[in-house]
Structure formats: structure tokens, C-alpha cells
Amino acid sequence: MFYLKYRPRTITQIDNTRVRDILKKILDSGVIPHALLFVGSKGTGKTSSARILAKAINCMENKFAKKGTDFEPCNKCKNCLSIDVSSYTDVLEMDAASNRGIEEVKNLIREVAFMPMSGRYRVFIIDEAHMITTDGFNALLKTLEEPPKSAVFILATTNLEKVPATIVSRCVKVNFGRGKNLDLINMLKRIDQSEGLGLNEEMLSVIASQSDYSFRDAAKLLEEVAQQKISKVEDLETFLGLRGRSDLMEMISAKDQKKTFVWISEFAEQGGNFKILIESLLSTLRQELLIKKGVIDQSEAKTTLKTSEVTRLIKLLVEAYQLMRSTPIESLPLEIAIGEFYNELSV
Ligand SMILES: Nc1ncnc2c1ncn2[C@@H]1O[C@H](COP(=O)(O)OP(=O)(O)OP(=O)(O)O)[C@@H](O)[C@H]1O
Ligand SMILES: [Mg+2]
Ligand SMILES: [Zn+2]
């Protein structure tokens, strides 16, 4: 799996540039905060970065071991390797979202009283930290008020609002945000080169744009594309269900009811992705709206629809998009939306 194979193992390998710089500064200073809070959307490197940090401060071959000036983990020593396979006694990792989570937080906090066995720091990584219960947070708060010198807490969450302010204020917050397009492309380039896939920049950029701002999703999508042996941007767009959206837009503009429905059913037969199709139609229509409002240059117009038709279609497609979650037939929400659009035209 690409996303596991290419998981960053050093600070330098983190493709999220802003996070990389913040973590570099922390490690470079040599003063490690007792509590860090990693906030950001899924697949942006929170867990990976927590592990890199745990390795760096417990590595036997870097500046924390008084060997040289490099703060990166060596990824070769006994400590680094056992952290990699989660068998290192001084790095305790737990998932607060799992069923056992609630009890585990308490056990974990009990562990804080113990000194490190073989490393310099005991690192407590708590994933999905927003799922910790009130009791758990209270216990954690006490610990964070007077943490033992050797303890480092790393809380990771996708949901900052659900973490009590009292906890947040005791942590150094690192904002992972969402994966930026440029950063996602850089990661994809790295994997592409290493795997010898030979995809061009345009293709990598299309993949990045369909990855929901997640490095994990981008790596997974690249793997699918590699498995399909897709090598042309046209084939990639077909695979992603992006191709033909401008044809569809033209048919809708021309108000050719029959052609539109035939196109949609063929798209369904070819296994096209309706979620992505609706997303791209919405993005085209929004563009149209901005053109009509004079925000964007007129020459980019793609349809001959009236402003009222554009806004109506946007509304119908947003509804269709919401229906995508519950529909038993993939094409149905779009067919309903288009059907309704044409019905309104005829009255
Ligand atoms: N900043 C990054 N640079 C390079 N690869 C990344 C980065 N962030 C994530 N990845 C890729 O995504 C995968 C998942 O990352 P990770 O588990 O660290 O994300 P996360 O933020 O903890 O996600 P979640 O919120 O879903 O737990 C990694 O194995 C790696 O392949
Ligand atoms: Mg994670
Ligand atoms: Zn090491």
C-alpha cells in the first residue's frame, strides 16, 4: 500500500511544509513541550508526525543522544526500530475513539508516574483525542498541570471544538490544516518517481485535486491509477468520472432532454463516479454565476443558460449531492435534478 510504504519517517519527509518547519524548530531548539496538540483534517500526517517526534527524542544516534547535531531520528537504532513496530515500552499509543479508549486513558495516565525504562522520554500519543470522556479529560488535565519532566503528551484530533479549552490552553498547538494542493503534488511526485510510474505533472495535479485535501487519499488514488496502468490524462479523467462533464454541460445548455438522459445512463454503465461528476458540474456552474455577476471575465463562459437557470440548477444539484449518500441507484439523484430542471422549463 503506497500510503503505508511512503509514510514519512523523518521530519524532512513530511510534505506539509508549514508543519515541517514548526516541528523542525521545536526539535532544533531541543526544548520539547510537555504537551502538543496536533489539529488537522484526516490524512494530513498527525499520527505520522507524532511517531517521528517520539523517535527523534528517543533515538540513540542523534543530537538527543549527544551524538552530532542532527535532530532527525536515524530510523536504524534499536529505539527507532521498536517505535516503528509499536513495541517500544516508552512510547504509548492509544486511540481514544476505540471502545477500550475510555479505560485506556486512565491506565495511560497511571503510567505517567513511571520513569522511562530505556528511553529519555515517555511519549503518550492519544489519537482522536476529542473522543476522550469528561472523566478522562479531568484526569488528563491534572497530569498536564504538573507533568513529570520525562513525559511528552501528543494529542491528535480532527475536531478541535470538542477538546476542552482548559486542555487546549495547556498544549502547544500545531495546526495541520488541510493538505495543500502543492504539498499533495509534491508527495505524489515523490511516490511516482520512486515507483517509476512516469505520470506527468498534469495527471498528478488532477489526482491531488480529487483527494479531499488528504495525503492518505492522494496516495491511495495514485495507487489505483497505477494498478489500472493509466498513463494519459484523458484516461485518468475518464477513470475519475471527470471526462465528458463539458459535453454534459453543453447538452443541458442546449436543453436537449433526451440526449442528456442518454448521456447520463451511458455514464452510469461505464461505471462513472457521480459524486465527482456533480462536484465538477457545480464548480462549472458556480464559475458561470460569477461570470454573470461580472466577477470573472466573460470570455470564459461555457453555457448559454440564463442567470435564473444557473442558480436553479445549482440548487437542484446541491440537493442531488446530498441524496448521493442514501440513494440505492448512483445515477438517480442527478436524473431527478435534471428531470426537474427540464420540467420547470416546459411550464
Ligand atoms: N504531511 C505528509 N507528508 C507525506 N505523506 C503524508 C503526510 N500526511 C499524511 N501522509 C500520508 O498519509 C498517510 C496517513 O497519515 P497519518 O496517519 O499520519 O494522518 P493523520 O493526520 O493521522 O490522519 P487521521 O486523522 O485519519 O488519523 C501516511 O501513511 C502517509 O502516506
Ligand atoms: Mg491519525
Ligand atoms: Zn534512531
Image (tube, helix red, strand yellow):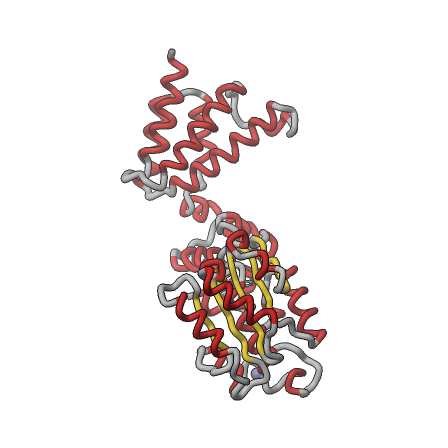
Q: Residue 253, image x and y in percent?
A: 46, 23
Residue 12 placement, left or right of 325: right
Residue 239 placement, left or right of 90: left
Q: Who is closer to the viewer here, 133 or 336?
A: 133
Q: Please give the count of numbered marks on the rendered protein.
A: 0
Q: Residue 322, image x and y in percent?
A: 40, 37
Q: Residue 243, image x and y in percent?
A: 44, 40
Indicate whether 232 appears above or below 139: above
Say if residue 73 shows up in the picture: no
Indicate whether 212 appears above or below 133: above
Which residue is at 54% across, 57% downward? 164
Indicate whether 8 appears above or below 90: above
The image quadrant where one finds the C terminus is top left
The image quadrant where one finds the N terminus is bottom left
Name the quadrant containing residue 291: top right
Name the quadrant containing residue 254: top left
Q: Residue 122, image x and y in percent?
A: 54, 79
Say if residue 85 shows up in the picture: yes
Q: Who is closer to the viewer here, 314 or 82?
A: 82
Residue at the farthest left position: 328
Which residue is at 32% across, 29% downward? 262
Which residue is at 46% across, 27% downward? 315
Q: Who is closer to the viewer here, 192 or 10?
A: 10
Which residue is at 64% across, 86% downward? 65
Q: Who is closer to the viewer here, 185 or 230?
A: 185
Residue 236 placement, left or right of 180: left
Residue at the farthest top position: 347
